[in-house]
Amino acid sequence: MSVATDTEVRLAEQVLDVLRGQAGAGVEAEVVVTRTELALTRFATSFIHQNVADLTTTVRLRLHLDGRTAGGATTVTSAEGLRDLVGRTLEGARLLPPDPGWPGLAPSAPAASSGTVDEATAQASPAERAERVRAFVDAAGGLETAGYCRTRFTRGTFANSAGQLVTGATTEAAMDGIARAAGGAGGAPADGVARASSTRLADLDGGVLGARASAKARAAVDPGEIPPGVYPVVLEPAAAADLVFSLAVEGFNGRSVNDGTSFARIGEAQFDASVSFVDDATAPGAIGLPFDADGTPKRRVELVRAGTTVGVAQDRRTAAVAGTESTGHGIGEASFGAFPANLALLASGSGDEQVHEVEGPVADSGVAALVAGLERGLLVSDIWYTRVLDPRRLVLTGLTRNGVWLVENGEITRPVSTLRFTQSYPQALGPGRVVGIGPVAPHVVGEDWIEADLRAPALSLAEWNITGGASG
């Protein structure tokens, strides 16, 4: 299975030819053609109940004509469908207001890589995904389980009327499952979660994930409450992932910086010296295409170096406003801005710590050592339903889920019920507030609404603001 095929290239060139025929040579245009094969095996009540596969080719056109910019998309790739796409987009351009911020087309430049593709994952069968589901269910030891295992293979081509042509491909495999333990004395059941993502299905071990989820569920039965207050916390990678995601979307976004709604200030020590952020879609094992929606080749970009903010993500439009160059982070939506989709939080200059795998609620690499160093605080397995309250300080409110435990003298003493927090994420990672960083930053299982390959390690933080519990 080749990284790029003539089919996607031919479709892109066909759209440009049709456009020239209808609009003449004065139009600036770019075409993105993606072919995605997504296969999903779902399970609930410990049984597989759905196995689906979808193959979709999407053609997106963006053009700039007479000072106006318009875009359109179609999944109908016949000659008639492509002519209709061009006609609709041209009509849209005539109706839209002028676009003085149009940055022009990306110049011709080769991509640094063709992307990471694992052939076995691209061709994975339902039986191979079912094997991992069975292993997850068996390892849960009789607890009720639910979740999914998916594989995805994407080929992409970008072409524009300025001569830029880049192609690439990527594979992704992910598993996300919960195990549910019955509550004691008629209490509510307790859930434990385990997730994993990689470019290779072979890297996902359903048995390890099922054992992890069930251990967490059993350890979370019959939780108690704690009063609101500021607590030291250890965030497992699943919880730390929300920090990385929010910093990527809201903070290191070139449009947010241009608009003055981001906390990021280049040249300032805004984070603890142990913290670095790097976005690198060209790294071995990175998930994603090697070019952005503007056709700019992706490259390694430092955003935070040893606590100091040194860069932000830019697309061609935000870079033009800032008077700089695109960093290859365009997503094709001017209203959204530039998104670092391969962002990783890394420990500055570290990597010598030992990796631990232990039983019980502590079951992610590096978490055990962080918990052992906590005098009194909380171990947080997962957080969700977070919403931004103050974008300039990046204050979010959200809830814990899938297990929280009180830690005293380096030992887990009892489970804690669901908690609400209100916390500035940059402040939580600020100077002097990061106690420890896990040695491994695993891939985060991506959100359905945006394609991203984020990496987050376990974190030990000095302060986390708990504002409520199960009783309010």
Image (cartoon, rainbow, N blue to C red):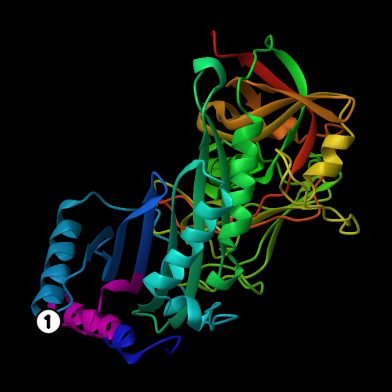
Please identify the quadrant where the N terminus is shown.
Answer: bottom left
Q: Is residue 221 above or below residue 150?
A: above
The part of the chain drawn in magenta is: 11-37
Image point 91% across, 59% down: which residue?
Answer: 352
User: Is the residue 401 above or below the residue 472 in the image?
Assistant: below
x and y percentages locating residue 233 in the rendered image: 76, 29
Question: Can residue 247 be seen in this snapshot?
Answer: no
User: In the rendered image, which quarter is residue 423 located in?
Assistant: top right
Q: Nearer the viewer, residue 321 or 56?
A: 56
Q: Residue at x 57, y 35 (%)?
A: 260
Is 381 above or below relative to 115? above
The x, y position of residue 133, in whole percent, is: 47, 59
Q: Nearer the viewer, residue 104 or 5?
A: 5
Q: Amino acid at mark 1?
A: Ala
Image position of 330 with respect to 261: above or below: below
* Magenta run includes residue 30: yes
Q: Which image quadrant: the C terminus?
A: top right
Residue 428 image offset from top left, x and y in percent: 74, 31
Residue farthest to the left, as pictured = 80
Viewed as shown, does residue 448 lie left or right of 362? left
Picture quadrant where residue 155 is located: bottom left
